[in-house]
Image (spheres, helix red, strand yellow):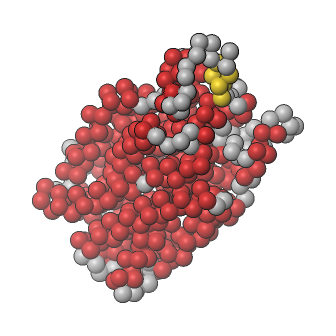
């Protein structure tokens, strides 16, 4: 009888077609998710004009999706550890596709907000699950790179929204960019058929045949044998309530710091995603130019995500992440000052790299920090708590915009959370991480 440690098998695997398949599926889902998330910011000026709402009301309309994302991230991240990830991901895709498209049929602020809330359940719920999926199957030596590469699909979705928005809104009105978001629902049957299940879930369910197939896919040299027993390291086994495990083995303080860091980063991301177009238009740029800033912001995010992941696999991911928060504080502050257009595009790109890109690297760090059995739960709670910052951002910045403050003060308000987030990351105890050898000696230590 052979005992096969599936986590070690995944850690030591060489990148192959199986990994590429997981990467492509997760990235495609995140691209659609990113489109659904960015589309409101792209269409916001047109929506405000058509529905006759002021900046404060518009902020509340944008935040309705973010309220849904809080519940989606917490609930779907936790439930995935119980019903399986492909099912949870399929439910999320159905929610954000159907209800984002439905928002395009609404004609009043309340109806729009309700549809966005329901879409937010799926938008928020899919993120922790695809990150957990990619983290579980990625080879250890390139894990951060693959997770951030996958999650850069979020920024690709934003780029697509910006490119489509410039043409569709002018020719067909703002509802058209929402109706286009219904297409991903067609992917659901393929997701259920082709997305591999979590190995921890399969072990708990005793589904040995599926584990054998996954083991052979991870390592083509693996030869199934009757009597093989698949196991997990002790720290990756689920014992008791998953939520309670986020605070066990010395992880409690670091869990709180992840929540603070996610809150601050998501505040910046959604402040920029929701109001950059409006702020730049108010500063004298045309709508077309303001939309170009959103495009540059998301291109920068792709560079920041992939570059940050590459650095994180070669240096200490915690220090790389703290440095990205510091860059966010500087670049966002600079957005409030007049400068040549070429320099402004560079600063906007850096802001995208150090906000959206930073959140993507933070997702990768949290995915590595928690044991496999509670990875989706840990990410779900971090993203769920972090969504509080995402909810507040459009409202707070909307109020500031309504006060007609100088442009610099609006951007300073967005930059301050970067400093707080950097401090929170530096306070995370990396020794408690599931990937740190020290953590394995703490399983029976008194708390």
Quarter of the C terminus within the rendering: top right
Query: Is 322 situated left or right of 354 in this image?
Result: right
Q: From where the camera sits, is residue 112 visible?
A: yes
Q: From where the camera sits, is residue 73 visible?
A: no
Q: Between residues 72 and 344, which one lies in front from this camera angle?
A: 344
**Where does the image place residue 385, in percent across and percent down from the top left?**
57, 47
Q: In the displayed orientation, state which residue is furthest to the left.
A: 171
Q: Is residue 314 above or below residue 256?
A: below
Q: Quadrant of residue 234?
A: top right
Q: Residue at x 30, y 34 (%)?
A: 187
Q: Between residues 257 and 22, which one lies in front from this camera angle?
A: 22
**Where does the image place residue 173, in percent across and percent down from the top left?**
16, 56
Q: Residue at x 65, y 41 (%)?
A: 370
The image shows a total of numbered marks equal to: 0
Q: Residue at x 36, y 36 (%)?
A: 93
Q: In the displayed orientation, state which residue is furthest to the right.
A: 446
**Where does the image place residue 363, in percent across and percent down from the top left?**
55, 50
Q: Is residue 277 above or below residue 73?
A: below
**Where does the image place residue 393, in percent across and percent down from the top left?**
48, 60
Q: Quadrant of residue 10?
A: top right
Q: Between residues 140 and 173, which one lies in front from this camera angle?
A: 140
Query: Is 228 situated left or right of 354 in this image?
Result: right
Quarter of the N terminus within the rendering: top right
Q: Residue at x 38, y 63 (%)?
A: 298
Q: In the displayed orientation, state which residue is furthest to the top.
A: 226
């Amino acid at each position: 009888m052979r005992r096969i440690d599936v986590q070690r098998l995944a850690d030591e695997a060489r990148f192959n077609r199986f990994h590429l398949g997981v990467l492509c599926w997760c990235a495609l889902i995140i691209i659609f998710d990113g489109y659904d998330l960015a589309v409101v910011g792209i269409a916001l000026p047109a929506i405000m004009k058509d529905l006759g709402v002021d900046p404060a009301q518009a902020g509340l309309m944008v935040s309705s999706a973010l309220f849904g994302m809080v519940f989606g991230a917490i609930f779907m991240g936790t439930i995935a550890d119980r019903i399986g990830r492909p099912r949870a991901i399929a439910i999320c895709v159905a929610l954000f596709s159907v209800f984002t498209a439905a928002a395009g049929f609404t004609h009043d602020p309340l109806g729009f907000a309700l549809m966005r809330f329901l879409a937010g359940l799926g938008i928020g719920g899919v993120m922790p699950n695809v990150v957990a999926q990619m983290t579980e199957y990625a080879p250890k030596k390139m894990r951060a790179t693959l997770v951030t590469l996958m999650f850069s699909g979020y920024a690709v979705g934003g780029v697509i929204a910006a490119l489509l928005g410039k043409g569709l809104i002018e020719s067909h009105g703002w509802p058209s960019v929402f109706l286009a978001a219904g297409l991903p629902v067609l992917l659901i049957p393929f997701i259920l058929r082709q997305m591999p299940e979590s190995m921890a879930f399969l072990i708990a369910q005793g589904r040995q045949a599926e584990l054998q197939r996954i083991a052979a896919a991870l390592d083509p040299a693996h030869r199934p044998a009757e009597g093989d027993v698949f196991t997990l390291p002790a720290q990756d086994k689920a014992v008791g309530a998953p939520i309670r495990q986020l605070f066990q083995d010395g992880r409690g303080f670091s869990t709180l710091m992840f929540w603070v860091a996610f809150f601050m980063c998501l505040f910046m991301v959604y402040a920029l995603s929701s109001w950059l177009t409006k702020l730049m238009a108010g500063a004298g740029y045309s709508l077309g130019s303001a939309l170009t800033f959103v495009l540059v912001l998301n291109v920068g995010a792709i560079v920041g995500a992939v570059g940050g992941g590459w650095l994180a696999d070669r240096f200490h991911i915690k220090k790389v992440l703290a440095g990205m928060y510091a860059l966010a504080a500087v670049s966002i502050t600079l957005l409030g000052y007049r400068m040549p257009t070429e320099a402004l595009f560079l600063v906007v790109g850096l802001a995208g790299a150090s906000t959206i890109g930073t959140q993507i690297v933070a997702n990768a760090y949290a995915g590595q920090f928690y044991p496999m059995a509670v990875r989706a739960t840990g990410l779900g709670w971090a993203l769920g708590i972090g969504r509080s910052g995402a909810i507040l951002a459009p409202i707070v910045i909307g109020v500031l915009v309504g006060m007609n403050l100088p442009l610099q003060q609006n951007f300073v308000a967005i930059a301050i959370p970067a400093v707080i987030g950097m401090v929170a990351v530096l306070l995370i105890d990396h020794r408690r991480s599931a990937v740190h050898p020290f953590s394995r000696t703490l399983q029976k230590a008194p708390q």
